[in-house]
Image (cartoon, rainbow, N blue to C red):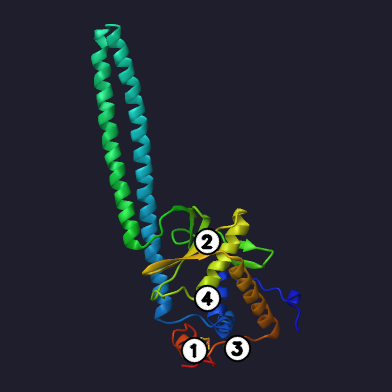
Amino acid sequence: MLSMALVRLVPSAKEVEQFGYCAHNWWLARHGAGGQGAASERGIAAHSALGKEQGLIEGEKREYRSAIAWASRGLMVAASVTFLTVELLYLNATTYHLLFLTTALVLVAGSGALLVIGLIAQADYRRRQQEAGVVPGRLLASDLTQHTPMLQDTAWDLTGRPDYILQTNGGPTPVEVKSGHTPEHPHHSHVLQLGCYLRLVEVGQGRRPAYGMLQYPDGVFRVDWTPALEADLKTTLERMRAAEAAGKADRDHEQAGRCRGCARRTACDQRLA
Ligand code: SF4
């Protein structure tokens, strides 16, 4: 039995996903066989399109927040001016109260217009969010719109960069975007990849996320960060280190369909189809 402690392997979450798909797939990728085929190209295009939409949505959200903030300020000033007008009326200072009243009305009208602009921006970003399939929530970081720093876990020797992180009621929540067809249940390799991000977010933020999300073209799956998933991930990392120490990783499934959909099929000497 090889000692795992002797093998220093710091895989990325993407590598864990490759290994979860097929151990030999990971081995080929690790030794220079790049991913090919329609699936890889579709994935790049989907990420890029979603990044653009996310950028527009965040712009509209800023517009909404700014309009609402200015409308609130305008209404507060209008309220103060109205109060002053009433005071002047009470004191019979007729020279100024008309001027104050006009100012208050202008402020109310301006605030009302800003409120309408804000509500239109809100409707726009919500519609865009729904159409693009972007998961709603406060965006903490997005690798789709800008290059985010690589997250690291020195205890588990793991790195990775989730597509985006949202603040939800479950804490900081990583979201991983997947192209291709939407499965009935999330693929195990995708769940393992998301497990890496959950672990990395937990270490980075100092707070355990309750769950993460896998976003497919036609649906989003919530994946809970459970002790069972943690154990599954640890076992996978140990298997990867054992393979690295052994100097090989063979195909670990008997599914021809998996080989047919494999990005490294043409470079593979163990393929079933
Ligand atoms: S073609 Fe099949 S055996 Fe080869 S790497 Fe891909 S999934 Fe594994």
Whole-angstrom CA distance, mark 4 to mark 1, is: 14 Å
Nearer the N terminus, badge 2 or badge 1? 2
Closer to viewer: mark 3 or mark 1: 1
In front: label 2 or label 3: 2
The first of marks 3 and 4 along the sequence is 4
Q: Nearer the viewer, mark 2 or mark 1?
A: 2
**Circle on res. 250:** 3
**In the rendering, which numbered label is found on residue 189?**
4
The local secondary structure at tag 1 comes to loop
Nearer-the-camera pick, 49 or 167: 167
Residue in view at x 40 percent, y 56 percent: 136
Q: Are marks 2 and 1 in contact (CB under 8 Å)?
A: no
Mark sitting earlier along the chain (3/1): 3
Looking at marks 2 and 3 on the same chain, the residue that comes earlier in the sequence is marked by: 2
Q: CA distance from mark 2 to mark 1?
A: 30 Å
**Nearer to us in this view, 192 or 110:** 192
61 vs 209, nearest the viewer: 209
Residue drawn at x 33%, y 53% is 126
Residue at screen point 28% across, 23% down: 104
User: Which residue has dot 2 on it?
Assistant: 211
Q: Are marks 3 and 4 in contact (CB under 8 Å)?
A: no
Q: Does ligand 1 reach within 8 Å of label 1's beta carbon? A: yes
* Badge 4 amino acid: Ser
Reading the image, the residue beneath label 1 is 255
Q: Amino acid at mark 2?
A: Tyr
